[in-house]
Amino acid sequence: MKLSIRFQFLVIFILMIMLSVGVTGSEYDGVVKVGFVYVDDEGNRGVNQSTYNLYEGAALSLEKFSYRFDDGTRVFGNFRNITLNNRNLVLGVTKSGLYGLTMRNNQYRRAYNFQGSRFTRRHQTNGQFWLQPHRYLKLFGGYGQTRKKGQMVDLFEPSGNTALTTVDYTQKYFNAGARLKHKRSVAELEYRGSDYSDDTNDANDRSSKRFKLTVATPLPKYENLLVNGGFQRFESEIPNQIDTLTANTVWGGLKFFYGDGYSLRYSFIFDRSRRTGDLSATDNISHAVYGSKLWRGHGGFSVGYRYKINDDVRDEVTTNGYFFSGWVNVVPEVTLKAGFGSEKKEVQEGRTLTGDEDFTRYWASAKYKFTLGFVRVKLANKKTENDDIGSSAEFTRVATDLSLFSENYGQLQTSYAYLDGDFENSGGAFRFREHVVTGDLLSAAYHNNLRAGFGGTYMRSKRDLDVESFLVRLTGVYSFSHDYKVEVVYSAFNFDDLADPSPTYSRYYTANVVEVNLAKEL
Amino acid sequence: MTKTITRLQQSAVCMVYLALLTAVHSPATLCQVFEPDDETCLMCHEEYDKGLAKTVHRLSSEVENATFRIGCVSCHEGGEVHADDPSAENITNPAKMTTTAVNSTCTQCHQPHTEMDNVGFDPHIGEDLACTSCHSIHNGVTALLMDEEAQFCGKCHVSAVNAFKKRSNHPLIDGNLTCLSCHNFTGRGNPDYGYGGNANCYRCHPEQSGPYMYEHGASSSFTTEGGGCTACHFPHGSPNERLLNQPNNSLCRQCHGLPPAHATAHNGEGASFGCLECHSEVHGSYDNSHLLDPQLGIKIGGSPGSCFCHNVGD
């Protein structure tokens, strides 16, 4: 729903009156912003996600608002872009140890075609509350609604085909539960439900129910031994298809803290899922055990093993996994970390599409901390091999990031990542490379009440597409009259598919966005 | 049959285990007496109560009918000595303490989530993180987190933050969600980060949740060995359309080879189609075990009957 210009100005007018009467009591906190967003763009509105949810018009925000009463009750809120369609609203009230209520509302637009005229919009509204009638008992619950409406273009449509799918559904979800907590012991019971209603086709309507019980406690007289477990029953039903999925899950575990930084953990999961009319069920079973040693402040390592079984009517698959990770502070300023994991999935009975699978992952990083910040270098590799179908995929990622903070000069955060991938399968082989550079610089020192910032992101991805995108952002802040600021943010967005095969369906997009705000700290 | 009995035995053991858990509990905590009182502390440390007043740690001496007692010395030990000899060495300051000491202070009242919430492996334990790595005691917001948007996660998870700047991404930067919208790692009894992860996705994307008469194995973590939504989608961000792991047919060929009939069908054109042009019901189908488009006949040949090789009603 687009608000009229008249309404926008009315809201701004009311706000200015509020400001003029001086809501400056010490019980208040927050920032009021009044301003305007200018958008000048051209090209394909369906390709650049960063600007899907951007709107031009008068903007009003009340950010990080907080008001406290003498009895400890606190009202808080965060209302961004109240007058625009990308509004994001949070309102809550709470009193420590007694109750809390938080409500949220936001919406998000996703564009699909060149003109941006075909889009879907998702509205989300929800509220959550908790109430503590006794120090050991907490009741909680909530209700929410997700609504999505609009037209979307199907994925991978043949070139030039602009067939549309209409989307119009509402999902309502709710939960309620109780938690008993006494020292380190907890028991929690929760019910969650949802109703999905598709206005384009009633046959898709469905509902779900979920009951969950969780218990955790240290054993009496053995405080270093913690045990926990739970049970969940989940049902998802399509009434018009007379089809129901039911899953019963039991899990549990124990954690033993031996002292001197040694610990041992074990966990199990048992899950049985069944469909209406199925003569057999699917079982998922998992056992995992981990051992850790920690030298506080100096280093530590963990070693783990996990065994999983997936068994359904057609096949049975087992997985053996091994994990290792460790870290060490060579000197207080330098931290080295490394890890390795391997999983082998084997088809014991029957046949699956992917067959046996080997998965390995390793990573290592080095971080140097100094007075002004830190610099970090990281290497990661993942490899998946499915010999039965002649498929393999390997990713290698090298990244570095730098973070600097100086009270005198400002802050700088920058990172660079390079990703290299190799794929092989029966259809052939190909390689892709990806570069992502991001950076943000914001001056801290006011010079004649002026503060400036510069930031941006550059990404180049070469797969079957050859995509380049960047964002450049310039920020200026001028402070005056103690609590007032004028903020100006200029952003330039650019997206280009350099391998664009079709000049008639251009995948080029550029936008210049200027946001001007008058801000007052309450 | 043997397998079924084994499963039943496992179920029985699990249920007995749960029953035992519910039967045990620990003794109650006692109220504290504060010495020195808050007023004494605030004589020198002016304004320190202002930030606390916005948090759950508001000093109980400033609250009418406080539901529980919190004072400066609840977290800062050595107050009595410090009041007589006000040097920094005479009192503890969690901001300057070791991880162990910080966590010990917090767990006097709070149950650490690393102890009980995850059955499996929690990497945050191995990282030697203190409670104060994510929580700001004097100036925190909801749950005393450093900020409502959970931007503190990005201090360590830099690569994850960068992923949200890619071509298709979840609207984290737009403010529609935060890291904690999906990563509820403190959730009670969450058995595993990955297992049942689809439930996270279905909350906002219910249209793909199923159940379907014909499930796509990869997308269902309940009924198959598939990895769930993340088998095909990068949840943070991707250079491909709609958060997909791989572009176009490469996505499907992560698991599927090119079936031989496709290479010869339609004078060889069958191999050049996009997989999803025909197998459009990729999340699951109510009509067809091959996840074919219910309108495939019309789409290709102009009428339902013209696509006779593909039994759409199969």
Image (cartoon, rainbow, N blue to C red):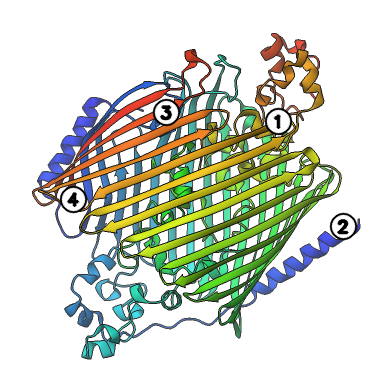
Q: Element type at marker 4?
A: strand
Q: Element type at marker 2?
A: helix
In space, the residues marked 1 and 4 are separated at their CA atoms by: 60 Å
- In this view, A290 is above or below B171: below
Tell whether label 1 touches label 2 (CB within 8 Å): no
User: Please, which residue is most extreme toward the left here?
Assistant: A481
Amino acid type, residue under disc 2 in the picture: Lys
Query: Of the residues under marks 1 and 4, which one precedes in the sequence?
Result: 1
Amino acid type, residue under disc 3 in the picture: Phe
User: Please, which residue is most extreme toward the top here?
Assistant: B302
Task: Tell us which disc is closer to us: 4 or 3.
Answer: 3
In space, the residues marked 4 and 3 are separated at their CA atoms by: 36 Å
**Which residue lies under the disc numbered 1?**
A428
In space, the residues marked 2 and 3 are separated at their CA atoms by: 56 Å
Please name the residue shown 57% across and 67% down the image: A326
**Which residue lies under the disc numbered 2?**
B3
**Which residue lies under the disc numbered 3?**
A495
**Which residue lies under the disc numbered 4?**
A521
In space, the residues marked 4 and 2 are separated at their CA atoms by: 67 Å
Front residue of B198/A494: it is A494
Front residue of A286/A417: it is A417
Where is residue A100 drawn, in percent x and y?
39, 58
Front residue of A446/A334: it is A334
Q: Is residue A89 left or right of residue A378?
A: left
User: Are both tags, 1 and 4, on one chain?
Assistant: yes
- In this view, A175 is above or below A58: below
Classify 10 Å Cα crowding around label 1: few (below 14), some (14-19), many (20 and above): few
Query: Of the residues under marks 4 and 3, which one precedes in the sequence?
Result: 3
Q: Element type at marker 3?
A: strand
Where is residue A200 drawn, in percent x and y?
57, 24
